Structures are given as C-alpha cells and as structure tokens.
Image: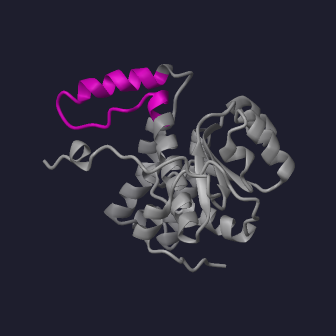
Amino acid sequence: MAITNEKSVSEAIQYRRSVRIFKKEPLDEQKVKECIHLATLAATSSNMQLWEFYHITTKEIIDQIATASFDQNGAKTAQQLVVVVARKDLWRKRVQSNISFLKSQYGNKPETEYSKREKFALNYYKKIVPTIYFDIFGVLGYIKYFAFQIIGLFKPIYRQARESDMRVVAHKSAALAAQNFMISMAAINYDTCPMEGFDSLRVKKIINLPNSSEITMILGCGIRDEQGIYGERFRIPFEDVYHKV
C-alpha cells in the first residue's frame, strides 16, 4: 500500500532531525515497511543494490540491539529499528540479477541479434563489473590498482579497484538508501536517528548476519519526544562548502 506523503520533499528534508528520544507511541509497521521499500529506489552504483534492510519490531530484539549500541537513547527509546547492511559479498548474485533483467528487457532474443548498446550493457556486467569486484584476499585488488594507475597516465580510467575501495562503494549506496528512508519517514511525520556507535559483531549475532556482511548504520524509529532533539540545527555556513567552478 503506497504512502501519501504529507510533506513535500523540501519540507521533509527541513523537518528531518536526528531524534535521540522517542515517545512511547507505536508506529504503523506497514508504513515503515513502505518507507524501506522507498529506500530501495535510491541511486546505487552500477545498479548493484548491494544492500539489505533488517526491520526490527520485536521489543526483546530492540532491547538487545540497544544494549549493543551502548544504550544510546536513540536505540533504547526507539519503537522500531532498521539495520542497514552493506552486502559487497553478494556482488556475483547481483550481477546475475542485472544480466537476467537486461535479457528480459531485450525480449529474450538470441545474443546475435543484440544491438551495439545492448551488447555493451551485457558486457558491462559480464566483464567490467567482475573485473572490478573480483579479488583474492585483497592481493588482486592492489595489482589492479597499480595497473590502473599506469594506464591512467595515458587515458582516463577508473582507479578505485582495491577491496577497500569496493567496500566504500557498497557503503555509499547503502547510505543513499538510508537517506531515502529517513526522508520518506519524515514525510509522514515519523522520526529517525541514524547511529554508527554500536558493537557491530554483537549486532550481527543478534540478527544472524553473515560475517561477510557489514552494517552501515542502525536507524532508530519513532515519534519525537519534546526533549528528543538536543538543540538547534547547526550547519557550517553554506559559503564555506559551496564552490562554483
């Protein structure tokens, strides 16, 4: 069931604050789930969608995660939690999903009948993406990195090819999705608190995440208490961060 936004995008962005204390007022689970669905529409590198979202609604599990999050009020008073997880380890599965989708869009015709553009798109997922993501204990990544730096002396080339670089890529996409979620929540007068302070190993055990996954952030969800926002919003002057070239 789609949500009818009560705020415009600009209004939702202005309304959104990191709320540290939530009221003891329940949230509609279906509405939060729909906001998570809107999160999955975020921009993502190469459409790889290397993310997962764990919607925590059970009080016992919320309490366990709050303890693993150092009893932060944003977790301890939350009515629900959303754990945003980066899944770089699923790149092979996501590649195959993209290939299957492209073929379905092409009408499942023989590859000999593909246009130049269609062949390029398929080759991107069959060759280029695996070249970037495939690694062996990080060693191959450094080999690719130095090779690309040399090639880059002669022509433009993608240079971030190390395992650590691809981790950053996965987390960036997951963070974009998290922002979609927070703005969608704000649009319906629901509040959130993005948290990076937690014992990741304990949280992964609580919700049975594989070792190869990485938690991008935990989002506390609820209705803001009068004391839930700790002060006026502070931002560096726009002139200090805006540069027209």
Q: Is residue 22 magenta?
A: no
Q: Residue at the location (51% across, 22% down)?
A: 138
Q: Is residue 152 magenta?
A: yes
Is 220 left, or right, of 153 in this rendering? right
Q: How many marks?
A: 0
Q: Position of residue 106 (x, y in %)?
A: 46, 70
Residue 13 figure quarter: bottom left
Q: Position of residue 130 (x, y in %)?
A: 48, 40
Q: Position of residue 26 (x, y in %)?
A: 76, 65
Looking at the picture, tell me which residue is in the foreground, 54 or 183.
183
Q: Residue at the location (51% across, 41% down)?
A: 171
Looking at the picture, tell me which residue is in the foreground, 33 or 68.
68
Give the residue at the far left of this rendering.
Answer: 245
Say which quadrant the N terminus sits in. Answer: bottom right
Q: Is residue 178 visible?
A: yes
Q: Position of residue 174 (x, y in %)?
A: 53, 48
Looking at the picture, tell me which residue is in the foreground, 67 or 48.
67
Give the residue at the far right of this rendering.
Answer: 60
Is 209 left, or right, of 123 in this rendering? right
- Residues shaded magenta: 140-166
**Colour mapping:** one colour
Q: Is residue 204 visible?
A: no
